[in-house]
Image: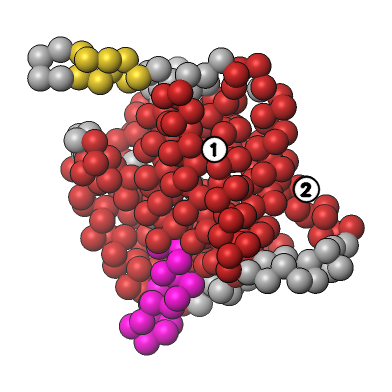
């Protein structure tokens, strides 16, 4: 399948399933909540389009996973710039480390970052913004003036937020696919195996995964989930090696390792809290 059409298909299917399950909840949303969910979905749609084009370009899953994980490093800095949220010192310390890791990944192509890698880096920026907006939409927020609280931004329930976000991604990527991709022969090439992979990615890799992630983000007082998310690129590399037989070159291995160190640096205080709470219990 054309890559953008694949993204559109899986997200629309996933969004429809969650919309059916949460139809009554979605009907009760106010217009501000709808706008928040659509904004989250629009940003995520751009990120997913960059991500699938990076994957389609032939960059290894392992490298793509580590580049995408840069969203964890970028997210606090974006939150600081866009929403004046405090960023810990570890954020600024992790950025040059991550940049060194990117430098090692570019060594394979003679100090030149490949187009596919640029797609993944662009995706990480939009995923960082998605993570910020998704967390803000999934939680109650006080909107303040100079001396007082002006308004309360009511959170969007997890199921409704996930359903609208996924449908928005599906519709926007579908429009982009219609404008840029050739759909001739898609129906003729549709096999049982292809349909099975589309359905699995829609229901397991999209509907279930993003519902669980959004629910976890609504429980933002816990640091354990954030720490666990740091090892996502490690799982990607291990599964890519086991399933597709992928192997990282020397420079790629060093670059991915340095990027992982940057992820550890930015979440170091949370990791310490996890160990302290484990010892205390």
- Compared to 271, does 170 lie above or below? below
Question: Does 225 sit left or right of 12 as displayed?
Answer: left
- Compared to 145, does 134 lie above or below? below
Which labelled disc corresponds to residue 165? 1
| Mark 2: secondary structure | helix
Measuring from the top left, give residue 208's x and y in whole percent: 66, 36
- Mark 1 or mark 2: which comes first in sequence? 1
Q: Label 2, on which residue?
A: 199
Residue appearing at x 44%, y 31% in the figure: 35
Measuring from the top left, give residue 266's x and y in whole percent: 30, 45
Check residue 34 for magenta coloring: no
Measuring from the top left, give residue 104's x and y in whole percent: 36, 74
Check residue 113 for magenta coloring: yes
Snapshot quadrant of residue 14: top right
Snapshot quadrant of residue 259: bottom left
| Mark 1: secondary structure | helix
Q: Please state which of residues 235 and 157 is positioned toward the viewer in this rendering.
A: 157
| Magenta stretch secondary structure, dominant | helix
Residue 254 visible in the current orientation: no
Measuring from the top left, give residue 15's x and y in whole percent: 65, 37
- Compared to 156, does 184 lie above or below? below
Question: Does 267 sit left or right of 45 as displayed?
Answer: left
Q: What residue range appears in magenta?
A: 105-121
Between label 1 and label 2, give the one nearer the viewer.
1
Question: Does 252 sit left or right of 268 as displayed?
Answer: right
Q: Please state which of residues 227 and 218 is positioned toward the viewer in this rendering.
A: 218
Residue appearing at x 67%, y 67% in the figure: 2
């Amino acid at each position: 399948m054309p890559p953008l059409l694949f993204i559109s298909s899986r997200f629309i299917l996933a969004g429809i399933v969650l919309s059916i399950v949460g139809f009554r909840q979605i009907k009760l949303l106010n217009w501000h909540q709808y706008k928040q969910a659509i904004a989250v979905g629009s940003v995520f749609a751009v990120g997913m389009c960059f991500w699938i084009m990076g994957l389609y370009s032939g960059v290894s899953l392992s490298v793509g996973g580590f580049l995408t994980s840069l969203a964890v490093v970028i997210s606090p800095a974006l939150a600081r710039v866009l929403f004046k949220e405090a960023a810990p010192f570890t954020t600024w310390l992790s950025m040059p480390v991550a940049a060194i890791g990117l430098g090692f990944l570019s060594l394979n192509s003679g100090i030149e970052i490949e187009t596919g890698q640029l797609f993944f880096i662009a995706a990480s920026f939009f995923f960082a913004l998605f993570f910020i907006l998704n967390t803000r939409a999934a939680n109650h927020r006080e909107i303040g003036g100079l001396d007082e609280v002006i308004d309360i931004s009511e959170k969007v329930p997890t199921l409704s937020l996930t359903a609208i976000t996924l449908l928005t991604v599906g519709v926007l990527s579908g429009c982009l696919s219609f404008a840029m991709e050739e759909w001739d022969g898609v129906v003729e090439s549709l096999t049982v195996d292809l349909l099975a992979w589309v359905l699995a990615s829609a229901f397991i890799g999209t509907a279930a995964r993003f519902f669980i992630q959004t629910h976890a983000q609504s429980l933002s007082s816990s640091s354990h989930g954030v720490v666990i998310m740091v090892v996502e690129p490690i799982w990607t590399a291990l599964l890519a090696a086991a399933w597709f037989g992928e192997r990282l070159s020397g420079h790629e291995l060093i670059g991915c390792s340095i990027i992982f160190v940057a992820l550890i640096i930015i979440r170091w205080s949370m990791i310490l809290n996890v160990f302290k709470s484990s010892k205390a219990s």
